[in-house]
Image (tube, coloured by chain):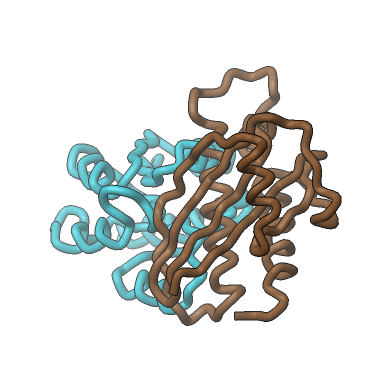
Chain colours: A brown, B cyan
Amino acid sequence: MQPDWHETVKGICFEIFEQLAFMFGEELDKNDVQSPDDEFIKATMTFSGHRSGGMDIIVPKRLAPSLAYNILGIDESDPMDAGIAEDALRELLNTLCGRTLPALFTDVEVFDLHPPEIEAISHKKWQQMLDHQNSIAFVIEDSPILINIHFLT
Amino acid sequence: MSFNILIVDDSKIIRSVIKKTLEISGIPVGTIFEASNGLEGLTAMRENWIDLVFADINMPVMNGLEMLDMMAQEKLLQKTPVLICSTEGSKTRIEELFKKGVRAFIRKPITPEILRNVVKEVMGDYDAARLA
């Protein structure tokens, strides 16, 4: 795996947010990351194959509907089906994971990606993830985004 | 002449994006059917005339690869063109898909331009083959 993988992953995140949701990322020093939000959504997916592990993304709960509106290309005044906001976050993680693994290893190795799952988390858990050594932080539309990748094998 | 299209993806938002893109693409679209996994996709194919299948790979219940294997065993479904839309980045896996008869591969995220061009290419070939 690449030694500078944090930068590789961050670059992929910026690219995918832009291509999928027309949202633009900003660099942020991890020590400066703060959030006034109390509610966050965490999407988690596992992978197996060449290496096993998982990837998570945590966003403030208020960002998920904007993400869905942008992906669908509709106005925020338009009605949106229940569950679409969470589905948007799942799809975002699925795309990020699918792009990240070949970039960290090679495009010859095969990985099986398993469907992402969603859970609501508190500010305390968000802080714990932020403090984790493997987490990557950046800002999208004034919202802090945390990404975590871990390998089991 | 319009095409009936089946979208097999566990993500409702991606099904909506593909559907919307097809509707504005200028491609003559008939009925668009939706399925959230390979098993539901097979049922839709058995019950309806489908001209083109869009399928994801990683799905619960039955994934895209398993669905392709099942289609290969059924005479009526063997020749239905399948276009894979996936985040898959492994060349090994993509080669495996083409060996299974997949007609085209689009790597997510999907852009309307790429989707439109690939569909026109695949359906152009398919239409010519049907008329021959």
Residue A135 lies, in percent from the top left, at 66, 58
Residue A69 is left or right of residue A91, and the answer is right
Identified at 48% across, 81% down, the residue is A108
Q: If the image is split into quadrants, where does the N terminus of chain A sit?
A: bottom right
Residue B112 is left or right of residue B22, and the answer is right
Identified at 36% across, 37% down, the residue is B34
Res. B94 image quadrant: bottom left
Residue B27 lies, in percent from the top left, at 51, 44
Q: Nearer the viewer, residue A17 or A145?
A: A145
Q: Nearer the viewer, residue A145 or B37?
A: A145
Residue A52, compared with residue B120, is above or below; it is below
Q: Nearer the viewer, residue B2 or A145?
A: A145
Residue A31 is left or right of residue B8, and the answer is right
Residue A104, compared with residue A82, is above or below; it is below
Residue A15 is left or right of residue A84, and the answer is right
Residue A50 lies, in percent from the top left, at 42, 77
Res. A110 image quadrant: bottom left
Residue A119 lies, in percent from the top left, at 50, 38
Q: If the image is split into quadrants, where does the C terminus of chain A sit?
A: bottom left
Res. A49 image quadrant: bottom left
